[in-house]
Image (spheres, helix red, strand yellow):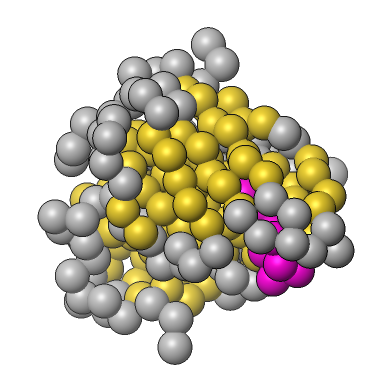
Amino acid sequence: QKEVEQDPGPLSVPEGAIVSLNCTYSNSAFQYFMWYRQYSRKGPELLMYTYSSGNKEDGRFTAQVDKSSKYISLFIRDSQPSDSATYLCAMTPPGHDYKLSFGAGTTVTVRA
Amino acid sequence: NAGVTQTPKFQVLKTGQSMTLQCAQDMNHNSMYWYRQDPGMGLRLIYYSASEGTTDKGEVPNGYNVSRLNKREFSLRLESAAPSQTSVYFCASSPLERERSKAFFGQGTRLTVV
């Protein structure tokens, strides 16, 4: 079983919809949680970075971490065609914050 | 600001050939990484370098070697390429400890081994 599980999708939504993405994990030691966005044939870019449990909002993006359930989510409000990409969750344990464990990624298409 | 630059962008190798993937960053980051990305597998760490002169194995190091040439450059070498090494390779770098999980990635090298 993988340490980080992520539904690969694909997910197709109309413009303006709320996109909901999530990952589950098995290692309770994970402490830093990230979401990366990867456009087709490009490298991943850091989108959201959170530490421990709670919510973090940045513009149209909200990241949630529920450590008790080992579950993280990313919400995209008022989705735009430019949000069409693959979204990767990643997480690291304390003391080894270079060891990113990635989910497989969810491909999202926002239809105009 | 170029960020993380990888060369080449595309490469086709025959089984048994060798090659070196080059990576350079201009953000004065201490840590550098090599990942491979395969469909359905996500990104997997091949090797990691915390600083100039140090390297450590990641999750999938077999068949690869690395060199941290200086603070800017981190190369990945395939000594005898195999079809199983067909993948997209990403170099990344990250700043100081406690922020090492904030990785910046290059554009990738698409490698096909036939």
- The reply to whether residue B105 is visible in this rendering is no
Residue A79 occupies quadrant: top right
**Magenta span covers which residues?**
B81-89
Q: Along the line of sight, which residue is nearer the eye, A6 or B63?
A: B63
Left or right of B95? Residue A7 is right
> Which residue appears at 31% of the width and 81% of the height?
A26
> Which residue appears at 64% of the width and 72% of the height?
B40
Left or right of B48? Residue A29 is left
Q: Along the line of sight, which residue is nearer the eye, A50 or B25?
A: B25
> Which residue appears at 29% of the width and 31% of the height?
B52
- The reply to whether residue A4 is visible in this rendering is yes
Outermost bottom residue: A1
Quadrant into which the C terminus of chain B falls: bottom right
Does the magenta segment cover residue A34? no
Outermost left residue: A95
- Residue A41 x/y as whole percent: 75, 43
Left or right of B21? Residue B111 is right
- Residue B21 x/y as whole percent: 62, 39
- Residue A67 x/y as whole percent: 23, 70
Outermost top residue: B1
Residue A18 occupies quadrant: bottom right
> Which residue appears at 49% of the width and 67% of the height?
B62
- Residue A40 x/y as whole percent: 75, 45
The correct choice, above or below, for B110 with respect to A68 in the image is above
Q: Along the line of sight, which residue is nearer the eye, B98 or A50?
A: B98
The correct choice, above or below, for A33 with respect to B53 in the image is below
